[in-house]
Amino acid sequence: RYICCWYYPCSAVNTPASRPLTRRSKSYGRSCVEAPSYFWQTPGHLTVLKVPTSRGAAKSQLITNKVDPEHIALLVKNEWKLSYVTPLHHFRHTQLKSYSRHLAAFIAAENQQGVAVEVGLEAGFKVTFTAVLGLAETDEDAETVFIQIQSKPAFAAAADAPKVVWRGWLTCVNGDPEYLRSLPSDFVSLPLFCTSGSESLTTLVKTWFERAFDCNFGSLALNSTTLNWLAALWTGCHPTCNIRHLKLAWSLPTQPPLDVSYTVNPQDAWELWNSIHPEESTDDKIDIKEVQSFINGLETHFFRHFKIYLSAGTLVKVSTALGSAHLDGKIKIGNSDYITTLLTLLTESALLKMPT
Amino acid sequence: MADLSNLAGLGSEPSGQIDSSVSSASNRSLRLAEKEKRKGEADPFGLAVKYLSQVEAGTVVRGNDELERNMVRVETVALSKGLPPEVITVLLDLALSLNAGTANCTRVLKFLIPATVVPQEAIVKGVSWLCVGKMPMNAQVLFVRWVLTVFDLIDCKDDLRSIYGFIFSFVTEENLCPFICHLLYLLTMREHGELMTKWFNFFGRQPFLTQLLALYKVFRPDLVTLSLPSRVRTGFKNHNSTWKVALSAVQRKNKGAVLVDQSLSLDVKEKPSSRKRKLHHLAIPPLTSAFDSNSSKKVLRLQELRSFKELLENIHNIELPAQMGSLLGSALALHYLDCVQDESAFLRLNFWLGHSLQEEFLLCPVDGSSDNTSEACRFLSTILFSQQFLQEGFSSTESFLYKFLSVWDGCLLRPQILDLLSDIPLMPSFYMHKLLFEPLKQLYFTSTVFFKCSVIECLNSMLVKWLTWHSVSASEGGLDISLNSNSSMTMTLSGFMDSVMELVRFVGLLASEGLRLESCHVLLLNQTLAFYETVCDMFLKFSLPLIIMPPAGVFYPALFATDSVSVDRLGYIMYRYRKNLTLAKKQEQQREQTFHISRNTYKEFNRNLQAMVNSMWNSWWCVPGSDIEIDKDLIALSKVAEPWCRFDLIHHPALFSYAIEFHQRTGKYWNWYMEFLFNQGFYGLNNFIQTNTGHGSTLNSQEDGQPKSQP
């Protein structure tokens, strides 16, 4: 059960100067019980939006037609740690150069606490903000922003190329249009933040963003429903793009804990999936029930051989040649042609974490 | 000047001759001037100052008895009464010019205690002597320290600010630097922020530099980035040790003069966090400006504000801080928040607050969750303080609470959570069940009696807030209440009444079941009666045309309670119900108003009233057809003698001890007993008896019609 609560667009910005002061009545910000919303309760978990129970099948698209291949190459290589970010206030895609300078100065200042650092002077770190254009799917999606930090050691030889020490990107793909439209125009929502690099630099970058754009970060753990979806969607791609294997990892709450690694032949997996959701079916939509029965089928098969109920444990990892995703919020992108499906799913997970 | 010397009263009055030599523009009356001129010849202090003002360069100092004598004379006066402004100018010039030698330079500086103010020209001239560069280093340091000490006494600082650049140039002087930085800190204005670009090359990490830079950063956040280490000492040291004692002595003597602030250290708002947590979501961020803030525009940053007056004067051009959450950290900022109308600003605040609460209490980070309850407690208290200050709740707290209630154990941070709960704004009755009542009910019935008391108390204060808010918005006109200033949703009066009714009913249910479960625990009973004290007065006090009677499960436990406080409270409540109902009836008859109290309410009231009057006053116990009809044979079985008068004013278990006491004092008459009883402080019962039976003290019943018992 999830809470469903729509945001509504607000009136124009008013400052005390532009409007006679009147006492505001109740509740700062938006009421959470506004008209056509209704509340559902999940213990300890909250969402602003409804989780879709069906979605379109993963479709391959030549992403390099839309996006600079160099940019895509940056996204594909690494393992990314996921976080969610609340909407950024006053973030402008036109200011990326200035952000680069300020973040570099901030990192330098944090590294030598108490010493002031002039903005714009290159000291040790070089930060580059790049807009990855074309990844956005709808008009509401903000363009992806890629950040790279290079370190220039103080005693490096002139010929030494600066080393990339940290990478990260903020993105929004197929974000819930209702939610995105409801935000006032001075907010930019890039809810998914992927990082790769040292934890300390990640913390610094997050802190800088929090101070600069009054946003907040939280770690984004995936849930098993998301992993189930990925397993099914990726398997469905097999006819068009060899997924090579479907690897699933379970963790069973036994004493001592039992980790099960389950690799399925791609053809077998696809046949199972095809029996549940026929390829030639007129309806393009995949229902959550189909996904569930696909996973159940795999679990039943495993039980037949090993007499272990996988459903008693938790699915912790899914991986194919198209990519991998871990329950604790780590992903890898294997094939850029299916990147949109993955990012849509992750954007959705991130948006569900937004505080109401 | 003259006033001062008269005030001091003693012999050595400053003479007019000083004035002529210093050419001060003092405007005394002629008469006074002449009088002083006559005295002048005999005034040793005046003569001494005059002598000192004429000391020229190259004067022999060693063995110069005359110089020494005059010096001592001025010194004595300075240390006992302080020096007038003109004399300060003269002496400072004498000292810094080194005309009387290096030793005398430091000596003069040390006794340069101002009686009232320090003229700005003296300081400017002093700085120019500093630029000449003849003075030894210790004298230079002493001079700047002296300026810092008397900074608040300088009459005007415009000229000083215009030589900011000259003063700034001494920053490179290693020994002077800390003091110069402090002086610059005190002098810095917005336009000086530009100078920052000149800085970056010479610094280490001394705190005084950092402080000044932090100030520059306030004005030009786009030019510099600075991170203060968590354990840095903030503020400047006090440099006034040399003069502190003498200065405060002189100032105490010349009461009424400007008081110098002895602690010159200024707190820079950038407060370092006490402990670095991996997840810092429970810290209120410090006030900082966004780096892309428009530095050329004439705006004021919140961290520049020092007083409420400044806030009021600049309320139209204050810039919001980089992080809205930082507003909760200072009371001054909260004042500002109260009149902010920028919707995005509230959204930022709510995002931050919602995120903090969610991360801490709902998503529960794995690390160090056991030892941070004190931190969480502090955080919630800050929110509570802010909400109480603003007299309304934040919407993110509200939605957090709805989610949290369903996972709460009823124990973690109970006082804070319940206090926050009582700040929940009015909501349509439809949501109340799902979001509030269901989770609360579960907690209530599975927790201790003390938790039950806190819940009732919390709901009572929620009701009071709703009613207060209603009576305010109703008086502002219009029955429709806008639930939220920016939503299209409004609540009609009947919608509001539905919500209130639901709440009162819910508490009625909780209370009667709770009292049954806890066998009429006296604390719970009193908490419940406190709630009904609010309920019974809704019409009279909050002009809400709604009267709801307590359920039998509350009324009878209170009527038959063994403690007199509860019985008295019930008396008061019944008395107020009667007042409210009478007024409602009157208004209905007079103005044919659309609202009316249902007949059932009157019936219910009359039944309760009858039960109460009968058992306490008429000694009839159970009336056939009432709520508490008990089979006669059953009572006979209990073998209680005269069961019908067990609950009258004499035999009632709550009052019996008073009856005995009265009897022992050989009281006999009924009226005396009543008098005695009411003198024990039972005002509620007194009012009740008076209005309903006509008995009691002075006031006789001339009450009109409707709610009347038939004894």
Image (cartoon, rainbow, N blue to C red):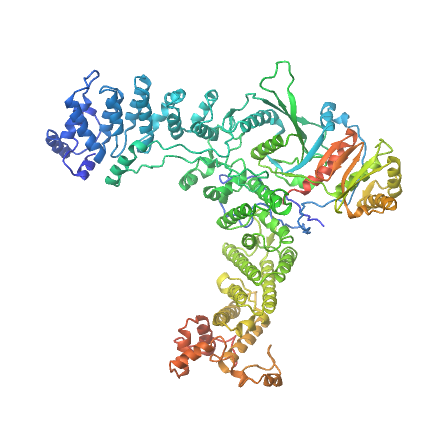
Residue A160 falls in image quadrant: top right
- Relative image position of residue B263 (x, y in whole percent): 36, 36
Residue positioned 77% across, 25% down in the render: A65
Q: Is residue B680 found left or right of B86 in the rendered image? A: right
Q: Can you see residue A124?
A: yes
Q: Position of residue B131 (x, y in %)?
A: 33, 18
Residue for point 18% across, 17% down: B60
**Which one is in front, B165 or B659?**
B659
* Quadrant (top left/top right/bottom left/bottom right) for the N terminus of chain B: top left
Is any part of residue B93 visible from this angle? Answer: no
Residue A209 percent coordinates (x, y): 59, 33
Q: Residue furthest front?
A: A256
Could you say where residue B467 lies in the image, as x and y percent from the top left? 53, 58
On the picture, is A287 further left or further right than A173? right
Q: How many marks?
A: 0
Nearest the eye: B216 or B44: B44
Name the quadrant containing residue B551. bottom right
Name the image quarter holding residue B246.
top left
